[in-house]
Image: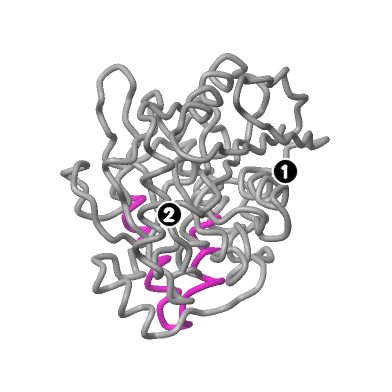
Amino acid sequence: MRSENTMKVGAVVLTMGNRPEELRALLESVAKQTGEAIEVAVVGNGSPLPELSVPGLTVRTVELPENVGIPAGRNVGIEAFGPAGRDVDILLFLDDDGLLPNQDTAQLCRQAFAADPELGIISFRIADPDTGETQRRHVPRLRAADPMRSSRVTTFLGGANAVRTRVFADVGGLPDEFFYAHEETDLAWRALDAGWMIDYRSDMVLHHPTTAPSRHAVYHRMVARNRVWLARRNLPAPLVPVYVGVWLLLTLARRPSLPALRAWFGGFREGWTTPCGPRRPMKWRTVWRLTRLGRPPVI
């Protein structure tokens, strides 16, 4: 088992090139992390990258000719560290408009992974830099009222997390097909099925401005399509209609606007009629594990 002092940490940052000042501030916060220096892969997702020279930081850059989506873009960042990220032991995934306010976050990750050989993924707490507020949707569990409580969880936050690279070697990367939305849960379910665990850590913080997920134009369609794909790819056959049906009822209960509802049902239909990638249903003991962790895979 690797000790915390020998674990190498890298970071992946995906950018559309439209937040150069925020990106530089993020990279500077990475450079200030204690312990061995962190190397960063910055992926320009269909956009050229700005000048990224930051004192004390080595930056690998990749410029993609087109926007391939969030999961595919992050997968490119993983491969920038060798197949399945094998050049490092841990990869941080950070939103380009985020910021690490504390200098010990990477070291806390090293300690956590070194202490728990079953730990595969850590989800950070996202807090607004001005108010300190953590949105309920950023606590990856059903009982989300107390964001300061750390716990085992069943999914994680895409732009504020750390992953042991052995997870990618075991189960593969994020699902390219998803483009945006629920790709983290797809990876989380596959990791849990392979025996890895996921922690939410309130003491590992990423500052990020408070936003609404619906700011993305494709939000409603992608959320609906990828919910169906998630079930088709990962759940035992009897649970697929239950999971999809529960989310259909929850969506209707939230009374979205008529345009949003049209987009949602368009994505819902697309989820059933288009290829979703390989189907690898989780074991029933994984269903039970998810249930014991507080989130059975029907919601």
Q: Which residues are magenta?
A: 225-252
Q: Nearer the viewer, mark 1 or mark 2?
A: 2
- x and y, in percent, of residue 67 in the image: 73, 37
Q: Label 2 is placed on what type of residue?
A: Glu
Where residue 19 sits, quadrant-wise, is top right
Q: Where does the image place residue 276, in percent across and percent down from the top left?
A: 64, 65
Residue 291 badge = none
Amino acid identity at mark 1: Val
Q: Which residue is mark 1?
A: 68
Where, quadrant-wise, is the C terminus in this rendering?
bottom left
143 versus 202 height, above or below: below
Residue at image coords 33%, 21%: 129
Give the colour scheme shown. Answer: one colour
**Label number found at residue 4:** 2
Query: Callout 1 environment at 10 Å: few (<14), some (14 to 19), or many (20+)?
Result: some
For the point 56% across and 32% down, the residue is 217
Judged from this view, the residue extending furthest toward the top is 21
Residue 86 visible to an observer of this rendering: yes
How far apart marks 1 and 2 lie (CA) works out to: 35 Å
Please determine whether, in this image, residue 89 is positioned above or below residue 170.
above
Residue 70, placed above or below residue 153: above
Q: Please say if 205 is above or below 269.
A: above
Q: 226 or 31: nearer the eye?
A: 31
N-term mark: 1 or 2: 2
Residue at 40% over, 31% down:
212
Q: Secondary structure at mark 2?
A: helix
Left or right of 119, for residue 262: right
**Magenta-drawn stretch contains 244:** yes
